[in-house]
Image (cartoon, rainbow, N blue to C red):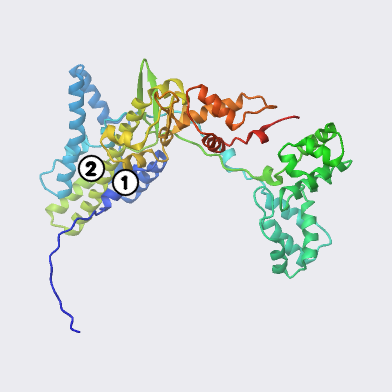
């Protein structure tokens, strides 16, 4: 069999992700704080970039001069303002291409004066006073559950080295709630102990503070705490040992009948059980506070909504004039190495500034489209939220759905009715019973939440009853959908919400 070498010509199309395009996509999906970190990192790594200084009034010198000139010329018509904004946006891009190409006749002075990130037509915002957590709240260290139990284990007397090692393994395998996550038999084999002896070590730890820590399930946790009652309550221990499922379903009549006691005694015992701690380690588990800084502010001024981008702490970028002189000198002296280095850094700086500029404009356009479609929400609240999908906004501003998805990811907007993630406004629709305008799923969830909050605790609303109430409000919805929304809201079933005591 002979191998034959041939040459062929083939025409095909393929998508190539340039580094510049990858950077633009990456910046688009960052929130404000993440973008500030990226910009500060670029400022340290790229010497061509520098931060534009601000005046004491918080304005850049270039922007102040521009406003003064505009005021001297008098008011502009809307058409003139739009033309000015388009020219301001296109003019720097034309200069960038000329700059990157390395032409000698490029006007550096004009570029440095005109082009900086403040040339964006989208409004910007500077917050003077920002509430931040105090250093005391940031730097304090609390005792963990593991440290607390390890200290008690070291204080315990009469334990062998093998038993202490097992005790350390048990403490190291506890969840944040204080339950044992590992198999005790496996831990016993690891230390070479018999399972019965390991059980004794576990009981010692379960008697540590907090009582019930190291339990393997809820029943064991409650049973341990019941034995510490003074005086001990036999009825309480029986309910925990034999009738915990009925207690969960609040079937007090069944418990009373099975134990042969009165309904009142079962209620009294249940009140005692409700005082137990089902998660012993909860008091030692402290999660870090998550602070949300809005990327966009939406204000209502008179009868119109104003969109303001939050650029507080965001450096204003420009090309360093110092490197203009270096590039000019390198071109005169025919220094190829210096020229290539500066041009490479210059190209990266220009792309970064352009990407940030386009990012701000895109966020502004997306938010503006959302505000126009959800005006009633911004005026009256969640119940007025309308159905909306990514394609709706994409069609409004002439962009792809994937771009809208990146813009709305992990970005928050401050509105007159609260702070929401931009993705919150995109939700499915629920049909109206009479065929009129559909409702957003989030609006229906809010109605369910309000219904449950106003219900009688002794006679909670069933899922079917909620369906009937929603139908009376012209909302057509299935019972399984109500159950799904209820689970998403973290609301228990009607049987578990029922309160007799």
Q: Which residue is mark 2?
A: 321
Q: Is residue 226 above or below residue 392?
A: below
Q: Decide if residue 243 is on the left or right side of residue 475.
A: right
Q: Which residue is mark 1?
A: 25
- Closer to viewer: mark 1 or mark 2: 1
Tell me the element at label 2.
helix
Q: Callout 1: few (<14), some (14-19), or many (20+) C-alpha neighbours within 10 Å?
A: some
Is mark 1 in CB contact (under 8 Å) with mark 2? no
Q: Is residue 419 above or below residue 167?
A: above
Looking at the rendered image, the quarter that the N terminus falls into is bottom left
Q: Is residue 350 above or below residue 473?
A: below
Image spot of residue 230 (x, y percent): 88, 41
Q: Is residue 57 visible?
A: no
Mark positioned earlier in the residue sequence (1 or 2): 1
**In front of the other: 131 or 395:** 395
Q: Decide if residue 284 is on the left or right side of residue 53.
A: right
The residue shown at (72%, 55%) is: 150
Image spot of residue 116 (x, y percent): 26, 37
Image spot of residue 152 (x, y percent): 76, 53
Q: Is residue 265 above or below residue 157?
A: above
The residue shown at (83%, 59%) is: 157
Q: Decide if residue 45 is on the left or right side of residue 466.
A: left
Q: Callout 2: few (<14), some (14-19), or many (20+) C-alpha neighbours within 10 Å?
A: some
**In front of the other: 363 or 339:** 363
Q: Residue furthest right?
A: 231
Tell me the element at label 1.
helix
Q: Is residue 349 visible?
A: yes
The residue shown at (52%, 39%) is: 290
Q: Quadrant of residue 456?
A: top right
Image spot of residue 220 (x, y percent): 76, 50
């Amino acid at each position: 069999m002979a191998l034959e070498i041939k040459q062929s010509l083939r025409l095909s199309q393929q998508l190539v992700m340039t580094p510049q395009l990858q950077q633009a996509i990456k910046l688009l999906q960052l929130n404000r704080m993440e973008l500030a970190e990226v910009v500060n990192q670029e400022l340290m790594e790229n010497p061509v970039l520098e931060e534009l200084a601000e005046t004491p009034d918080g304005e850049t010198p270039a922007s102040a001069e521009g406003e003064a000139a505009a005021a001297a010329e008098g008011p502009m018509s809307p058409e003139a303002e739009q033309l000015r904004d388009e020219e301001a946006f296109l003019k720097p891009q034309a200069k960038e291409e000329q700059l990157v190409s390395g032409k000698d006749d490029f006007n550096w002075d004009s570029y440095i004066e005109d082009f900086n990130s403040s040339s964006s037509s989208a409004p910007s915002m500077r917050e003077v006073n920002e509430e931040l957590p105090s250093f005391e709240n940031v730097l304090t260290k609390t005792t963990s559950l593991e440290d607390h139990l390890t200290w008690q284990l070291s204080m315990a007397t009469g334990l062998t080295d093998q038993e202490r090692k097992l005790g350390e393994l048990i403490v190291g395998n506890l969840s944040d709630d204080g339950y044992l996550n590992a198999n005790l038999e496996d831990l016993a084999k690891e230390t070479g102990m018999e399972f019965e002896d390991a059980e004794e070590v576990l009981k010692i730890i379960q008697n540590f503070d907090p009582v019930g820590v190291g339990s393997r399930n809820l029943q064991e946790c409650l049973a341990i705490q019941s034995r510490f009652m003074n005086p001990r309550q036999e009825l309480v221990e029986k309910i925990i040992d034999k009738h915990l499922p009925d207690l969960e379903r609040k079937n007090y009549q069944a418990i009373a009948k099975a134990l042969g006691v009165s309904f009142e005694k079962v209620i009294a015992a249940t009140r005692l059980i409700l005082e137990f701690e089902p998660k012993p380690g909860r008091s030692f588990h402290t999660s870090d506070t998550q602070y949300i800084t809005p990327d966009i502010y939406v204000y209502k001024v008179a009868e119109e909504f104003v969109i303001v981008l939050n650029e507080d702490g965001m450096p204003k970028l420009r090309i360093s004039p110092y490197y203009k002189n270096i590039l000019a000198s390198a071109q005169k002296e025919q220094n190829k190495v210096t020229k290539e280095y500066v041009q490479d850094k210059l190209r990266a700086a220009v792309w970064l500034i352009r990407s940030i500029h386009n990012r701000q404009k895109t966020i502004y356009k997306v938010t503006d489209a959302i505000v126009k479609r959800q005006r009633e929400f911004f005026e009256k609240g969640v119940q007025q939220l309308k159905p909306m999908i990514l394609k709706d906004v994409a069609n409004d501003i002439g962009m792809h759905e994937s771009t809208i998805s990146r813009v709305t990811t992990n970005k928050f907007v401050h509105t007159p009715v609260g702070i929401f993630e931009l993705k919150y406004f995109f939700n499915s629709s629920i049909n109206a019973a009479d065929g009129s305008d559909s409702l957003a799923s989030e609006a229906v969830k809010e109605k369910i939440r309000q219904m449950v909050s106003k219900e009688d605790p002794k006679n909670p609303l069933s899922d079917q009853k909620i369906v009937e109430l929603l139908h009376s409000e012209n909302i057509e919805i299935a019972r399984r959908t109500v159950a799904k929304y209820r689970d998403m809201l973290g609301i228990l079933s009607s049987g578990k919400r029922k309160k007799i005591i």
